[in-house]
Amino acid sequence: MRETYFEDGKWWVSPYNFHQDVRRDLLLPPKVQIHDATLRDGEQTPGVVFSIDDKLRIATKMDEIGVERIEAGMPAVSPQDAEAIREISKLGLKSKIFTFARAMKQDIDMALECGADGVVIEVPIGYPKLVTQFGWTWEDVFKKSRDVINYAREQGLYAVFFPYDTTRARPDDLENLCKGIMNESPPDSIGIVDTMGCATPEAVKYMVGWVKGMTGLPIEIHTHNDFGMGVATELAAVAAGAEVVHSCANGLGERTGNAALEELMLGLHLLYGYDTQYQMDKLPELGALISEISNIPIARNKPVLGHGNFIRESGIGIQYVMHDPLVMFGTHPSLTGRAGEVVLGKKSGKASIVYKMQELGLGELDDAQAVELLTRVKQKGIEKRDFLSDEEFVSLLNEVRAVA
Ligand SMILES: CC(=O)SCCNC(=O)CCNC(=O)[C@H](O)C(C)(C)COP(=O)(O)OP(=O)(O)OC[C@H]1O[C@@H](n2cnc3c(N)ncnc32)[C@H](O)[C@@H]1OP(=O)(O)O
Ligand SMILES: O=C(O)CCC(=O)C(=O)O
């Protein structure tokens, strides 16, 4: 693992991330894998439907970027879902293919029939769901899960036990379930699932240690973004020893979405120092594909993918945007396949005018003309309540030159 905060021409993040007093208390596992659930939880975004061909394109792009695991769907949902998983399994991707299954033998059979490598076996354990939605006790959950976990493993599937709404489980219920499962049907790994996105990073850190202590299993963390902390909570879980992070590209998923794939990748690589092999410069291609297919636009300030992230209007420091971007941004735009951009408007300064003149090859101005042009640029920005197009700038420049 890297312990450096700077890589020439690529990024410059906080050195305190790697300060020995900060790192000393972290229980970072040597390797972390991404389990992406865009094709299942992402498609649970209301109104989003991926065709079989869409799913093949998304899975192929994810494999190209280096996602270790793809949750390709839940075969029980429809024959089309099963068919998509079957086709994805046949692609021969490096990514391992998982399906989502209820604690039912028939769902495991469908995973097998679809050619999956592994299965995420979901059962409720959060108390509101357990008591109101299902009318089950932890023992019911245990009895339903036990044989299904054993069956999946006997059939050669990697079995992730996924007691969802984990963060709202009563401690005794979760403890009894974990102990029962470990006695009679240990899975390959266990999920801590913040179904409602309602646990703090600190609470999840505690839970990772607690569940690891009870089971000795690798921990998978799956969060939602209801409090805007989905990614932070997953990274906190990694800092407490979780080995697998679940994600959805573009932050799709139920309600406010899941922890965003692209944000996790950068967080793991840059902020925590994992030497991942992810092709981060291809993330905008994946983002654009998913946005087009899901018909959900990417917010212009969305971390990693927003098209406005490397645009600067404010005049102070403007000359560094293109020539020395790490003065102005924590990551070089090219790291994630992007380019910086200088725009003019209300917040411009004289350096902005000089920069734009050079960029567009418009010659030079004397100081008085530059000041006059800046005044007009600011006025136009205020009137327009936006930044100026190059054509608008040239038009103002011509006015100023005509006056002189
Ligand atoms: C946090 C969550 O919501 S988890 C899953 C969310 N994902 C989805 O719902 C995917 C989309 N869903 C669908 O397409 C449909 O709801 C289906 C195909 C999954 C199921 O639809 P239905 O055929 O209507 O099944 P239904 O919801 O009635 O459930 C069938 C049985 O599964 C049981 N069941 C539900 N979840 C589980 C589970 N995780 N493990 C074991 N059994 C379960 C139910 O209790 C019910 O049992 P019963 O027949 O004895 O009453
Ligand atoms: O949320 C769901 O619908 C299924 C389970 C899950 O992904 C979760 O609990 O977060």
Image (cartoon, rainbow, N blue to C red):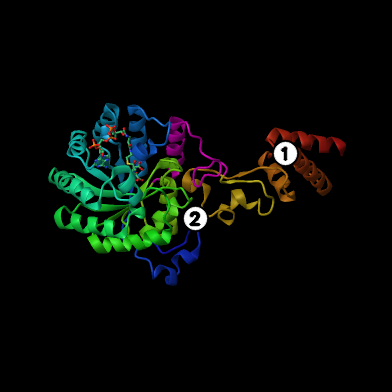
Quarter occupied by residue 4: bottom left
Q: Which residue is mark 2?
A: 11
Which residue type carries mark 1?
Leu
Disc ID at residue 129: none
Could you tell me residue 113's position as x and y percent? 18, 33
Name the side, left or right, on which 4 lies relative to 369: left
| Contact, mark 2 vs mark 1 (Cβ under 8 Å) | no
Mark 2 or 1, which is nearer the eye?
2
Q: Foreground residue, 231 or 184?
A: 184
Q: Foreground residue, 2 or 177?
A: 177
Disc 1 is placed on an element classified as loop
Disc ID at residue 362: 1
Q: Gap in Å between the C-alphas at discs 2 and 1?
A: 32 Å
Quarter occupied by residue 96: top left
Name the side, left or right, on which 109 lies relative to 388: left
Q: Residues within 10 Å of mark 1 (few under 14, many from 20)?
A: few
**Which residue is the extreme one toward the bottom?**
21
Query: Is 197 colored magenta in this rendering?
Result: no
Which residue is found at the position 79% from the left and 42% from the top?
373
Q: Foreground residue, 340 or 197?
A: 197
The CB of the residue at mark 1 lies under 8 Å from ligand 2: no
The magenta span reads 279-308
| Residue 53 vertical position relative to residue 116 in the rendered view, above or below | above
Which residue is found at the position 87% from the left and 37% from the top?
403
Query: Is 283 colored magenta in this rendering?
Result: yes
Q: Foreground residue, 213 or 138?
A: 138
Could you tell me residue 80's position as x and y percent? 29, 27
Residue 375 is at least partly visible in this image: yes
Which residue type carries mark 2?
Trp
Q: Where ligand 2 lies, by quadrant? A: top left
Disc 2 is placed on an element classified as strand
- The N terminus sits in image quarter: bottom left
